Image (cartoon, rainbow, N blue to C red):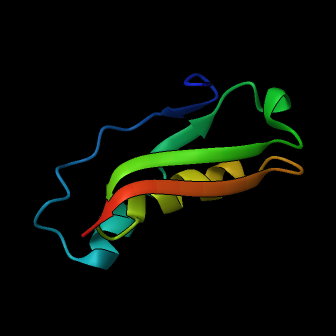
Amino acid sequence: MNKQSLIRIENTECQTRKKRFIRWENMMNSFDLRSSKKLRGKHILLVDDVITTSSTLDACAQKLQEVEGVKVSIATITVA
């Protein structure tokens, strides 16, 4: 498990009552990469307990895919 390579750089407002596009827009610049060299060519599994609009996972996946050769998969327990 690697919790240091993708970090949240911006604390966003609560997403609960926001519409889909606003949630997506709210999350798009909230993450940054550290140690991207360690991620090159890796297959990364993102795990979220509940997917509502997928805004957070989308923002994370897009940032991770900036690294050469990265493949991203997603796992969740529930889709709301």
Tell me which corner region of the image, top left, top right, bottom left or bottom right, holds residue 27: bottom left
63 horizontally vs 47: left or right:
right
Q: Is residue 55 left or right of residue 75?
A: left
Rendered position, 11 above or below 24 = above
**Left or right: residue 55 compared with residue 6:** left
**72 over 79 or under it: above or below:** above
Up-down: is 16 above or below 64?
Answer: below
Q: Quadrant of residue 55?
A: bottom left
At horizontal 85% and vertical 29% (from top left) the residue drawn is 37
Q: Residue 34, how many percent across, how many down?
A: 67, 27
Residue at (28, 71) in percent of width and height: 22
For the C terminus, the quadrant is bottom left
Q: Exactly how many numbered labels are in the figure?
A: 0
Residue 51: image location, x then y, percent? 34, 62
Where on the picture, by quarter, is residue 74? bottom right
Residue at left offset 82%, top offset 41%: 42
User: Residue 50: image x %, image y %?
Assistant: 30, 56
Query: Where does the image place residue 67, in percent across and percent down from the top left?
Result: 80, 46
Q: Quadrant of the N terminus?
A: top right
Residue at the extreme left of the image, as rendered: 17
Of residue 31 and residue 73, the one placed in the foreground of this image is: 73
Residue in the image at 40% along x and 66% along y: 54
